[in-house]
Image (cartoon, rainbow, N blue to C red):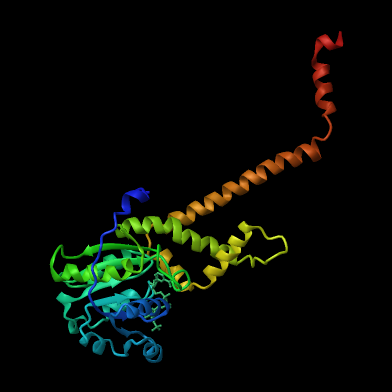
């Protein structure tokens, strides 16, 4: 680990809030989930997505644009990228940035990996663009009733120190702060290091267990129920997300190898001990007479 958790969790800053025009790009499960709270807080919301979400948007009080160009012409304060990890690059590269008031637009992402969107934003966006990378460490299930106490990881990748552009970033962060989120500022690289050990490992173990079709029994223990619960939680997440977590975090291959080595160690401990126990019981059940007689024969004192 590059840093201890208590070194990276900085004291909470208080962000004041103004109404923002937020443009959501990718209106899937998570985009819709965030839109509900942002709408409740009084922000003005527009959305665009590959598929048609007109009806969903209408029900949520969000204005939907099929055409990203028309969406950009609305000049949102914030572009909030909520696409899958793997779709972000093609979406951003084909986005009609020229239609935005680019200098006054804050770009934010919510992807579950952080170095990848950070570097992509830095590569694709003009230098004058402000960039905030975030990862709400919760979703439609865990944040269904409240966001209180749930962590929001963020990295102000390229944000002005003062002025209206700095304020815009604070306004955006205050959406989460005012819901009671635990505000955790850390670099994208630190996030990915932690996330490989926590999120990716959890997903991987959940996926492995889901191949075992764990059933409930009349004697389930609490720990077994936890394992079953993990497989149920993971089964709701797409393979697309899992692929993105793996491919777009530089630390996950090492975690996968560690997991494999740990499994081998456990198996070897188990089988090694079992083999010597069974050897004693089945093969060496009586003292080896030939071994003792040979020794006796060879001992001149015994013969005498
Ligand atoms: P999702 O329901 O699968 O939605 C993904 C969005 O990406 C959809 O709007 C989809 O477009 C778009 N998309 C997928 N493939 C595309 C492609 N080839 N070209 C253009 N657009 C494409 O996933 P989600 O659960 O909302 O997650 C969205 C993001 O939030 C992910 O990056 C994830 O890591 C992050 N996140 C999710 C959670 C969570 O609990 N769900 C929590 C924290 C962070 P259409 O639907 O329009 O076709």
* Residue 139: quadrant of the picture: bottom left
- Residue beneath the point at 23% across and 81% down: 76
Residue that protrudes farthest toward the left in the picture = 163
- Residue beneath the point at 33% across and 68% down: 176
* Residue 283: quadrant of the picture: top right
Quarter of the image for the C terminus: give it.
top right
Residue 123 seen anywhere in this rendered image of the structure? no
Residue that protrudes farthest toward the right in the picture = 304
Residue 253 located left or right of residue 272: left
Residue 58: % across, % down: 37, 90
Q: Is residue 99 above or below residue 128?
A: below
Q: Is residue 72 above or below residue 156?
A: below
- Residue beneath the point at 23% across and 83% down: 96
Residue 268 seen anywhere in this rendered image of the structure? yes
Residue 284 located left or right of residue 154: right
- Residue beneath the point at 71% across and 64% down: 217
Q: Is residue 33 above or below residue 57?
A: above
**Which of 223/83 is in front?**
223
Residue 165 located left or right of residue 152: left
Residue 123: % across, % down: 23, 69
Residue 282: % across, % down: 80, 40
Residue 196: % across, % down: 42, 58
**Which of 98/19 is in front?**
19
**Which of 26/87 is in front?**
26
Find ligand 1 in the image and state its quadrant. bottom left
**Which of 81/45 is in front?**
45
């Amino acid at each position: 680990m590059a840093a201890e958790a208590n070194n990276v969790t900085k004291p909470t800053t208080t962000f004041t809030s103004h109404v923002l025009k937020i443009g959501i790009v990718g209106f899937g499960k998570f985009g819709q989930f965030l839109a509900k709270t942002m709408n409740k807080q009084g922000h003005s919301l527009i959305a665009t997505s590959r598929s048609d979400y007109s009806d969903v948007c209408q029900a949520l009080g969000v204005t939907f644009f099929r055409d990203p160009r028309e969406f950009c012409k609305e000049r949102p304060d914030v572009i909030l990228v909520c696409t899958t990890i793997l779709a972000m690059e093609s979406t951003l590269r084909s986005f009609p940035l020229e239609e935005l008031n680019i200098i006054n637009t804050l770009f934010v992402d919510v992807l579950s990996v952080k170095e990848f969107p950070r570097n992509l934003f830095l590569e694709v966006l003009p230098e004058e663009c402000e960039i905030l990378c975030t990862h709400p460490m919760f979703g439609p299930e865990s944040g269904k009733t409240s966001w209180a106490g749930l962590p929001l990881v963020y990295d102000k990748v390229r944000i002005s120190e003062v002025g209206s552009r700095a304020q815009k970033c604070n306004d955006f962060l205050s959406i989460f702060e005012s819901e009671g989120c635990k505000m955790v500022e850390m670099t994208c690289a630190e996030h990915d290091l932690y996330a490989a050990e926590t999120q990716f490992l959890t997903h991987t173990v959940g996926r492995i267990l889901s191949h075992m079709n764990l059933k409930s029994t009349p004697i389930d223990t609490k720990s077994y129920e936890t394992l079953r619960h993990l497989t149920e939680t993971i089964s709701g997440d797409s393979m697309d997300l899992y692929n993105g977590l793996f491919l777009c975090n530089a630390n996950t291959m090492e975690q996968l190898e560690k997991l494999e080595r740990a499994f081998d160690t456990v198996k070897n401990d188990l089988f090694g001990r079992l083999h010597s126990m069974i050897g004693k019981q089945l093969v060496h059940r009586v003292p080896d007479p030939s071994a003792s007689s040979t020794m006796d024969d060879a001992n001149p004192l015994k013969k005498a």
